[in-house]
Amino acid sequence: MNSQIEQVDQLTREAVREVFLGMLSMKVEPEPPSPLAADPAGEIIGSVAFIGEATGIIYLYAGMGFATVITSRLLGISVRDVDGGEMVTDAIGELSNMVAGCVKSRLCDRGWRCALTFPSVVRGQQLSVERPAHTTRRVIGFRNSQCHFLAEVALSENPIAKQL
């Protein structure tokens, strides 16, 4: 499992950097993870699971202020034109899907067959994600010039999924 988490961790680091640069024209660099800064507008978490020879979930955590910037970049509109509601939710879901899709593609290239779930997005104040005890996880901090955000990889052992 340690080798698997290390590989998926590295693939996630690469995927986040590539997706942010390619889709948002935003350069981001990994940094040590630390809690998100308090955002009066709240927080948002996008997630996509993968099931197969590698089974887990990738989460992206951001404050709503940064999520609004991401949405404006993804849609090619100004920040003030972002409605803050469904637009942001859809953008974070799509961004999570792109990152997880990139990781899945590279897992499949390594012979680890897997499939993705639909993206899920949660919004609120002081959010946290609880995981089962048998899950191995890695949290990765990222920063662009102004904002800090997090990605997390959680893997679990799933012998049934290996039969896919």
Image: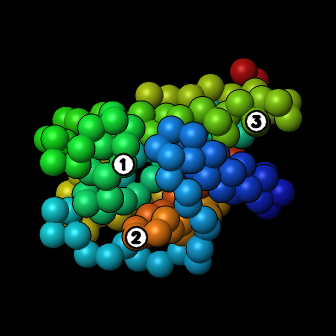
User: Extreme top residue here?
Assistant: 164
Q: Is residue 119 visible?
A: no
Q: Residues within 10 Å of mark 3 (few under 14, many from 20)?
A: some
Residue, disc 1:
70
Left or right: where 96 falls relative to 63: right
Residue beneath the point at 22% across and 49% down: 79
**Closer to the eye: label 1 or 3:** 1
User: What is the secondary structure assignment of the residue under circle 2?
Assistant: loop
Residue, disc 3:
106
The disc, 2 or 3, on the residue closer to the chain's N-terminal end is: 3
Which colouring convention does the figure follow? Answer: rainbow
Seen in the picture, residue 102 relative to 8 is either above or below; the reply is above
Left or right: where 113 falls relative to 35: right
Left or right: where 113 falls relative to 57: right
Q: Residues within 10 Å of mark 1 (few under 14, many from 20)?
A: many
Q: Disc 3 residue type?
A: Arg
The disc, 2 or 1, on the residue closer to the chain's N-terminal end is: 1
User: What is the secondary structure assignment of the residue under circle 1?
Assistant: helix
Residue beneath the point at 53% across and 66% down: 142
- Quadrant for residue 133, please give it: bottom right
- Quadrant for residue 65, please give it: bottom left
Q: Disc 1 residue type?
A: Ile
Residue, disc 2:
146
Which quarter of the figure is the N terminus placed in? bottom right
**Closer to the eye: label 2 or 3:** 2
